Structures are given as structure tokens and as C-alpha cells.
Amino acid sequence: MKKVWFHLLGVMAVVIGAVALTTHSTPVSASGTFKVGMECGYAPFNWTQSTSANGAVKIQGSSDYANGYDVQMAKKVAKALGKKPVIVKTSWDGLPPALTSGKIDAIIAGMSPTPDRRKTIDFTNTYYASKLTVVVRRDSKFAKATNIQDFKGAKITAQLSTFHYQAIKQMKGVVKEEAMNNFPAMRVALESGTIDGYVSEIPEGITAQDANPNLKYLKFSKANGFKTSPEDVDLAIGLRKNEADKATINATLAKITTKERNQMMNTAVAVQPDTSSQGNWFLSILKQYGPMLLRGTGMTLLISLIGTIVGFVIGLLVGIIRTIPTPKTKGKRGLQWFINWLLSVYIEVFRGTPMIVQAAVLYYGAAQAFGINMNKTMAALVIVSINTGAYISEIIRGGIISVDEGQFEAAHALGFTHLQTMMKVILPQAVRNSLPAVTNEFIVNIKDTSVLSVISVSELFFSAETVAGQNFQFFHTYLIVSAIYLILTFTISRLFRLIERRIDGPKNYNVMNNQMQVETPEVK
Amino acid sequence: MAEPIIQVQNLKKAFGNHEVLTDINFDVNKGEVVSIIGRSGSGKSTLLRNINLLEEPTGGQILFHNQSILDQNFDLPHYRAAVGMVFQQFNLFSNLTVLENVVTPQTTVLKRNAAEAKTHALELLKQVGMDPFVNAKPDQLSGGQKQRVAIARAVAMDPEVLLFDEPTSALDPEMVDDVLNAMKALATTGLTMIVVTHEMAFARDVSDRVVFMNEGVIAEMGTPEQIFDHPQQTATQEFLKRYLNRA
């Protein structure tokens, strides 16, 4: 019981420290770049493309480009500020923390200035005024709806943390489904019949209909449509509170007329990536998005490989430290107790919290609390390594326990020190015993790096989301991606089997001469 | 000749409230072969394990060359290298081959160079008849073969004293002789040996002195003739009667 309390105390100390430090705000970077965060997957506002065509801007830390209404707007604003626009691809939920932690300077992502959002961030004036719609299947009975009250019994959803989802309340008699993470997911759900419609805004509706002829967005007259407040349908640029450039940006926006804005939107709808595919779907996806998927695969492999290796080394070290025999002097014993306590706190904390939360805390938290602006890939490597280390420590501990006590005794009786015993005798056996579990951990890492999309690391899953968001061939894209995952994990499990066999050595050994004659030793 | 190499004084060992050794006193002289016999549970193995500190004594003193091994600053790894041990369960390092089992302790603890250690190891493996098996892993050997390798491993450290903890008790009867022969060969080299054993013939023929332990104390101690032919204590007589009748 006492032990449990100490663990809790340690966790609380960490949390309190972190909270105390978050109150400091990071200064705005006075660099010559204007870093704009967006999903790059919400056409026609923003999307990802592989060329710089139609005035696209390169995405930071990637060889892909972003384009769309938001990107063009970002270019205008940056120009007015005399800065160079940089697009930072960030998941929707990651946008506000990325802004407050200084990873980006502005959010131009089709975001509405809701009162809730205003609590944490500031907004400029409107840069696009939109209208709500419902996207349905063309062949469904709801396709002819002209009033938002025509949806009795329909399963309706909207994007998570948007006012779209709140607006479902106005549709009497609908079945409100769980909110979804992004538009591609909702389009898939709609097409597959899991839902009957989703609430969206007109530009997105146009795009969905253009991309997929089976879908249709509905127009409602003012009286029959959604009642919305201007702060919801009006889209604004998100800024940090007390941003010095706010006035300049508002002045720039004021100069862009409604006509000009509609023009920009029409252009965006017109130039958004072509989603109709010709010929073999498999080849066309590979041809168009092969490099993107390949880079995603490389990133996934890099993170999980390095994460597993570093985690393995951490696990071995922890294993060695935790099995050190109790020293004789009191001071050393106290130190050992303290180190062991720290290690168990480490293991409990990292094993006991989801990696997705750890990644968000490390990447956004470190920036917000300490002003440390970590590279995304670096943060991903650190998180996966530390997380894996916690698991492998326990795996190795199990491996050490499974080694016969006699092995320790024999080594000690020969005069081996603790470190020598571990390195030469115990760990080789413990590692051999733990290898199947470590393989498991590696495979889990390959798949679980997908949660790193929360900090917008462009690993395989994040790339897949982007591709699917562009070509709307969800089933096909994810089928290819699952094949890639399977190839990776299968190769790794086979590879580790080979390693295991290699460690075990040959079943037959070479006898240097006839072993039948050596049963009785000669006495000399 | 009577130069004591190990002196055990008033040694006590308890596991919790259970006292296993109550008050043990005996000296081992250089070059002597001492056999410790007695019933199972009489404390023989515990005594041996206290001598190389695999168990920490609860009381008393153990001296090696007149120096206390229980001292805070005592160089334990060096002492353990000088006082080898052969286990009932062999305890060969299962991740290493036969040759590596004998080479690694030399290079690790004594810092011998690999070539020298290998030559030494091959020579000793040959003496115990295990040289054909240098590339085998312990799991591929029989009990008797393993124990001969374990003996070679202990001897390779050039110890001053070798402790044997029932080295033949886990072996099939036909394997026992191979191991006993190897031990006999060692006894003739002048190595100091302390052997916990149930092999009465070995104790009688090979040892210089026999210690009979009973319920945590040394009940009787003397030359093999004294113990086997003229035991003074009834406990010794009863124990030997049972054993010798069986043989």
C-alpha cells in the first residue's frame, strides 16, 4: 500500500510541475516566416497535392504542396505582413495547441470563431462566410429534402469539435450519431450506409458531390435551413491572444471584396485535385500517390525501428539496474531504493497512459510550458522510444526471472561482478527468452505509430488519410495501406524468427572425434 | 603442512526463525581433502554455500588466509575466483558452448587473454574427457558430461580451494564414476577440496578428513578410519549403518 502512495505522489509532482509551467506563454516568433496551420485535407479550403501547380505552397517538412482557398488567403496575408508563407500540416484537433504552443502563427483552416475557441485563442474578422448544408446519398429518401425537419429517423453526424455537430440539434427526430474525426471518414461512412447524412458547409458539399456522384449536398431556403449565428458560419483566422499583427491582417481582409472571395472559392473548387480515376485503380493510386505512401512507409519504419531499438536498450539498462543485489551500506541502499522507485514510476506512467496522450503532452506541452520547439520527427522518436522502453523493461524483467537461479549462483561463485554476470550470462538468456515478446512490441510499434498523426507526423497512416482525402477512393487506398502494413509486420516477424534460430545455434554440433569412445575419462 | 587456509569459527546461519547451522567450527588446511557427510537437511550444503558467501552467515566468522571474508572491504570477486564451486545441478551457462563455459570466466574474472584461456581450457577439458564436445551447448550433454565440464570450468580458474556441493547426486548411477574419477584425479594434484557428498566410498578412499554433520552442528570429525571404522557418536553409527548396508 505504501508503495502505491509513493507512485501516486511522483505522478502528482510531475503533473503539478507541468501545470505550473503552462501558465507562461511563449513569445511570438519574430522570424521572417508566417507559419499557417491547416489540415491540408478539407477541400476546397485546403488540400495536399504533389506538385506546385496553381500557386500551391510547399508543406513544411514534406515534399508535398498545399493548395486551396485557405492557402491563397494565407499567401495574401503573408504578403501584407512582408513574410514568407509556410504551411504546417496539422490535424484538426492539433490546431489550437499548435497555435498556443507557438508551433504555428495562425490557423487558416475553415475555422469558425466560436465562443469556446475564443477562450483560448483570438480571431480576426471573417475571411469567408459560409452556409450549412447536409450531404446525403443521391439514391436515399433524404435526397429530396428541402427542410432540415425532413430527416426523421435519419442517422446524422458531423465533424468532432465543430459547431456543425451542435447544429444537428435543430434537426428534429434525427438519430444523432457519434461525431467523426474528419470529412473523408464521414464520406466513407455515408457511402457505406453507416450514416444517412452529415452536416457540412456548402464548399465542402460541392466538393463531395463533385468527387463522388453518389453523394449530394442539399440546399435549404433561409426559412427551412439551419439557424446559425454569424460567428459560426463566418470563418476567421485564428491567432494567439494579443497578436501584434492582428490589425494588419484585418486591414488586409477588409480589402478583399465578397466578389473576390467568391472568385477565389470558385477557382479553388475548380483546381482541386481531380478525383476521377482511369484504368486500373491499383496502378493509378500507386502512380499518383506511390511516392507519398512510400515516404509514409519509410517514416513508419524509421520511427518503429529506432523506437524499438532505443526502447530495447532502455529495457536492458533498467533490467540490469533493477536486479543489482542489495548493497551493505545504508547510504547506498537508500540510493538504490530511490533509483528503483524512480524506475517504477517511469514504467507505471508510460505503461499506464496512452501513447497518443504522451505524444500530445510532449510535443505541445513542452512547447507551451518550456518553450522547447521540438522537431516533430524527433518528438515521435522520443515518445516511441520511451514508451517502448517501459514495456520492454518489464519484458526483460520477465526474461531475467525466467533464467535459472543456478546461472546467477555459478557466475557469482566464479567471481563475476553483477555487471559481468548480467552481460555475459543472464542477459543473453533473458533476451533470448524475451525475443518473441520484443518482436511483438516491434510489430505493435509499426501499427501504433499511426497514433502519432496527432502531432502530424507524416507516417504511413497519416499519408493514407491524406491520399484518401484527395482521391476519395477510401476502400482502395486503405486496402493498399493495409497490405503495406501487413508486408512490414510479416517481414519483421519472419526476420526475428531467423534471429532466434541464429541465437539458438545449430541443432547438431561437430564432435571433434568419435564421441562413443569418450564416455570414461582417462585419469591422469 | 598444517597451514589453515579456511577457518570457520562459531558460524551460525538462520533462514528467518529456522536455524540451519547452530555453531560450526572447523579448519581446512592447505592441500587437504575434506568430505562432509550427513543426512539431507543436516546443513551440509548450507555450510558450503556460506563458505563462498552464496549465503550470508547470520553469525560467526570465516577466515581465508587469516583474513575475514565478511569484512566490508573484502575483495569478494577475487576470493570467489580463488575458491571455486561445483554444483549439484552443474549450472553450466546455457547460452555458451562447452569451450566458452570454460574460457569466459578466465577472460572475464582473471583477465587472461583469449588464446591463453583457450589453451588452458582445452587442456582441462581433455583431462576430464570432454574435449570432443567443445562446440556443444550444455543442453546437448548428459548430466555426467555436464558435471565434468563444470569441474573443468572451476579448475580453469586455478583456484586454491574447490568446493563440491553433492556433485554426483543429480546423476544417473552409470555417470557417477566418470565424475568421481575426475575428482580423484584432482585430489592427487594437491588441490584443497571440500566435498559435500553421499558417496561414502569416495569419502573413505579419497579424503584426508571426514566431517559428519547432524542437525546443524558438526557431530563428529576425524580421519576416514576414525569415522568409518570407529564412529564414536550414535548418530554417526546409525547414519553409516544405513548407508553402508545399502552399498
Image (cartoon, coloured by chain):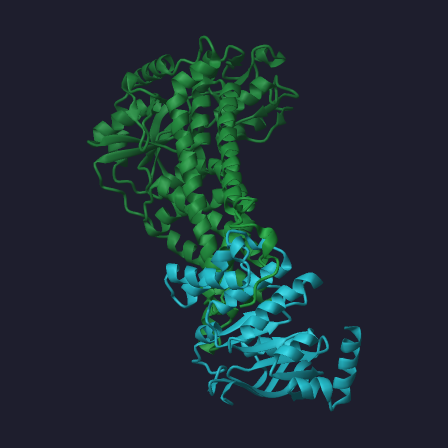
Residue at image coords 28%, 46%: A27
Colour that chain A carries in the picture = green
A489 vs A106, nearest the viewer: A489
Residue at image coords 52%, 70%: A413
Q: Does residue B98 appear left or right of residue B46 in this picture?
A: left
Q: Specify the farthest residue to the left.
A: A82
Q: Does residue A171 appear left or right of residue A100 in this picture?
A: right
**Image coords of residue B66 (percent x, y):** 47, 88
A271 vs A342, nearest the viewer: A342
Instruction: Specify the quadrant that holds the N terminus of chain A.
Output: bottom right
Residue A363: image quadrant is top left
**Image coords of residue B228 (percent x, y):** 71, 84
Q: Does residue A170 appear left or right of residue B228 in this picture?
A: left
A512 vs B79, nearest the viewer: A512
Residue A105: image quadrant is top left
**Image coords of residue B243 (percent x, y):** 76, 76
**Image coords of residue A198 (percent x, y):** 54, 22
In this rendering, does residue B43 appear at all? Answer: no
A258 vs B202, nearest the viewer: B202
Residue A238 against residue A173 in the figure, above or below: below
Residue A501 against residue B2 in the figure, above or below: above
Q: How many badges with numbers are in the image?
A: 0
Colour that chain B carries in the picture = cyan
Residue A244 against residue A43 in the figure, above or below: below
Q: Specify the farthest residue to the top.
A: A279
In this rendering, does residue A396 appear at all? Answer: yes
Residue B236: image quadrant is bottom right
Residue at image coords 47%, 11%: A280
